[in-house]
Amino acid sequence: MANDPLADALDVIKTHEFKGRQECVIKPSRLVRETLKILQTKRYIGEFEFIDDGKSGTFKVKLLGKINKCGVIKPRFAAKKTEWNEWEQRYIPGVGFGFLIVSTPEGLMTNEDAKKRNIGGRLIAYIY
């Protein structure tokens, strides 16, 4: 469980969405925070806040019920800037339906942003 905080976070979000819950609590990390920011800008989740409990803290995330499936991509494949269409076909069920989260030299971003900036990166997660 503690080996991949992002996988744990996405699993918690997916199960809480499936059960119709309004919010969930996630263990924090920098990668989880950046992923939550991307999900929030794409309107897959609502507001989230960091709650400091004196230890490591937690993220409290408001769910909107818009996530059908999400998960991490292991191993973290390297995607060249010319291969985006192949990776989208592999992990996303349809055009304009979901996105990939990618770690690039310019930071964490979606595959659409990486395609616009003409850069490659490592595949982190998929959401639709």
Image (tube, rainbow, N blue to C red):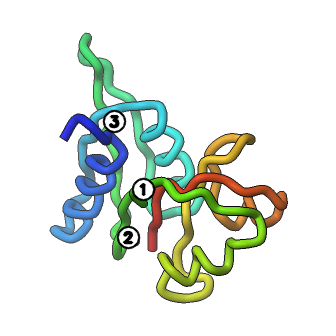
Residue annotated with mark 2: 67
Q: Is residue 108 left or right of residue 119?
A: left
Q: How crowded is mark 3: few (under 14 residues within 10 Å), some or many (20 or more)?
A: many
Q: Is residue 51 left or right of residue 47?
A: left
Residue 51 higher or lower than 101, as above or below: above
Q: Residue type at mark 1?
A: Pro
Q: Residue type at mark 2?
A: Ile
Q: In which quarter of the image is the C terminus?
A: bottom left
Give 59 or 115, whichever is nearer the viewer: 115
Dot 2 falls on a residue whose secondary structure is loop
Q: Is residue 124 left or right of residue 95?
A: left
Q: Which of marks 3 and 2 is nearer the N terminus?
A: 3
Tag nearer the camera, 3 or 1: 1
Residue annotated with mark 1: 75
Dot 1 falls on a residue whose secondary structure is loop
Q: Which of marks 2 and 1 is nearer the N terminus?
A: 2
CA separation, marks 2 and 1? 23 Å
